[in-house]
Image (spheres, helix red, strand yellow):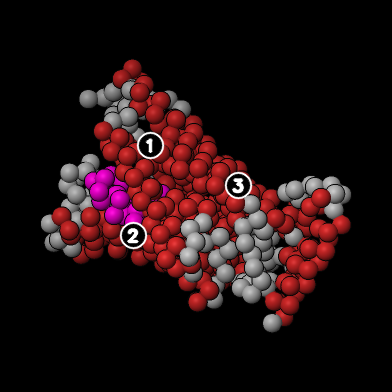
Amino acid sequence: MPLGEEALNTGDTAWLLTSAALVLLMIPGLALFYGGMTRAKSTLNMMMMVMGALGLVGILWVFWGYSMAFGTDVWGLVGQPFEYFGLDQLLSVAEDSESTTPPMAFVAFQAMFACITVGLIAGAIADRARFGTWMIFAGIWATVVYFPVAHWVWGEGGWIFEGTGILSPFTSEDVGVIDFAGGTAVHINAGAAALALAFVLGKRLGWPKTPMKPHNLTLVMIGAGLLWFGWFGFNAGSALAADNTASVVFFNTFVATCAAALAWLLTEKIRDGHATSLGAASGVVAGLVAITPSCSAVTPVGAIIIGIVAGVLCALAVGMKYKLGYDDSLDVVGVHLVGGLVGTLMIGLVASDLAPAGASGLFYGGGFDQLIVQTIAAVAVLLYSFVVALILGKILDLTIGFRISEDEEITGVDRTTHAEVAYELGTSGAGGKFAGVGAAAAAEAEREGASA
């Protein structure tokens, strides 16, 4: 039965718009989280990369982003790029609409997902990327990777859209991929691109010999808190209604994050002898990432198990960059790529038919089918994003240059690119004559590390 505007559910609409605002809040939260983790001389640049992506992708969403993600399907790969160009057709409710919320509420909600996904990538290349080149990369990557992948996962007809049946040849039953709020489209997608750019830009001067610790852990903790708060909109808002699914998802998001934070801290304590505030903040984000795809498919106990596994594995994964030799500055790979894989794959193990998604994983008598389709979806997104980001990043590096010069990196990208500094401390105290001595020593250490 056609609903039309008179039958819109105001409660669902209010929840969806509130959720969109919560996801928007996550973006400055991410900027604070990343900004606190960098060195002081590149804090503003890191924040600008996140906020710059917000502004750019938000505009692209109006002209072709939404159409590519949610337009009429083209071969299961992408929506028709200009079907909703300018979004004019979506300003009113169609008489034959069966949705309980206005179309523009969904447009706004999904726009925030696109913006934060691109911003996540920036953390891997802190301290050394040209801002202008980053903005070009962000626009192109959003267009050729994020928008199509969002269609794969959430667009009607997308090749890994739940229930399309395209993956049925790999299973004994027609089992659909479950990705409730973006384990593949957001976190695996961004993490794979971050790894590619870490290879393209190379290591920071002096890394790993020169200590490059977070300059402001207070900002990190504030950012983590804002991310956790906003993530309830990210996950529970994906129910698109103020209903039982949103309630289950909300609570699963909460307990998985608690478990991941504790698991990360325990891993740190056993490995390093200390449980740190950075570990707590990172554990929070790891738990949020892992529960994102699985929050509608598991019980609260299942959510806790996913949180524990994510907390331990992500804490171990962030140290792999030192062994493998890639400089992922702020651990985007270790947290988002690994956390996204954990959450996506564990659906195939601990999904319960008691949860809203109604699927059963291997440990709940469902066999291997769900695990198989989750693995195919995760690997496909990972490879596509990595390869395209690697090629795009390399082309930009060879043509207009992606990395700042050595002198700019030593001086600090905040000052050389933005003509600003995060902390204007004047001529006394920490900003007085002894600050120059410290800066000179740090610069000399970077030069020595670069020449080693």
User: Which residue shows up at 47% across the image and 36% down it?
Assistant: 22
**Residue 435's quadrant in the figure?**
bottom right
Crowdedness of circle 1 by 10 Å Cα count: few (<14), some, many (20+)?
Answer: many
Quarter holding the C terminus?
bottom right
**Residues at badges 2 and 3 in contact (C-beta under 8 Å)?**
no
Q: CA distance from mark 3 to mark 1?
A: 26 Å
Q: Amino acid at mark 1?
A: Gly
Q: Is residue 294 left or right of residue 90?
A: left
The part of the chain drawn in magenta is 287-310
Say whether disc 2 or disc 1 marks the residue closer to the N-terminus: 1
Q: Residue furthest front?
A: 273
Task: Determine if the magenta segment contains residue 249.
Answer: no
Q: Magenta span: helix, strand or loop, mainly? A: helix
Give the secondary structure at mark 1: helix
Q: Which residue in the protein does label 2 denote?
A: 309
- For residue 355, say whether it is visible: yes
Residue pointed to by mark 1: 237
Between 9 and 432, the one lying in front of the other is 432
Among the two numbered marks 2 and 3 on one chain, the one whose residue lies closer to the N terminus: 3
Q: Which residue is mark 3?
A: 219
Q: Position of residue 212 (x, y in %)?
A: 64, 65
Q: Nearer the viewer, mark 3 or mark 1?
A: 3
Horizontal side of residue 187 vs 412, given as left or right = left
Instruction: Please give the name of the residue rendered at 18% of the width and 63% of the height, measured from the top-left corner.
Output: 368
Q: CA distance from mark 2 to mark 3?
A: 26 Å
